[in-house]
Amino acid sequence: MAMLWIKTFHIVLVASWFAGLFYLPRIFVNLAMETDPAAVKRLLLMARKLFRFMTLIAVPALACGLWLWLVIGIGSGEGWIHAKVGVVVLLIAYHAYSGVLLRTFERGENKRSHKWYRMFNELPVLGMLAAVALVVIKPF
């Protein structure tokens, strides 16, 4: 029964984390296009609060996932779980790089176009698709 609760929390926390992973780059698109200082200030405040929220949500999401991985067994020989962990590592790197991009905007040093941020915004969709497909299909 405890495992079902951990799975439930994991799913809800991951969905919440992904909401941030989807929305923060969208704020970056707007920041890259915005010229009004008041609007930039408001968007930066939104981005900072969202990044803090998604980081606080990611930690227990990852903790629940780690707990489930330990229960399934790290060396269980099921390749799909190892591939999923690889996808999660890439998503953590994406999250961290989003923080780097946020600090770049805060310093007023952004050099990238809004088109680049639109493409950057699509990467977590691919990560989510890969992770869900690995869990549901278990291809190897």
Image: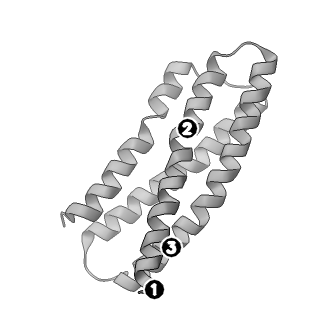
Three-letter amino acid code of the residue under disc 3 = Cys
User: Which colour scheme appears in the figure?
Assistant: one colour
The residue that disc 3 covers is 64
Q: Which residue is mark 2?
A: 23
Residue at x 60%, y 65% (from the top left corner): 59
Residue depicted at x 57% and y 45%: 20
Q: Quadrant of the C terminus?
A: bottom left
Label whose residue precedes the other's in the sequence (1 or 2): 1
Residue 71's quadrant in the figure? bottom left
Distance in Å between CA atoms under marks 3 and 1: 11 Å
Residue type, label 2: Tyr
Query: In the rendered image, which residue does mark 1 sit on?
Result: 2
- Marking on residue 68: none
Which quadrant is the N terminus positioned in? bottom left
The image shows residue 111, relative to residue 95, as above or below, that is above
Query: Where 63 sits versus 16, above or below?
Result: below
Secondary structure type for disc 2 = helix
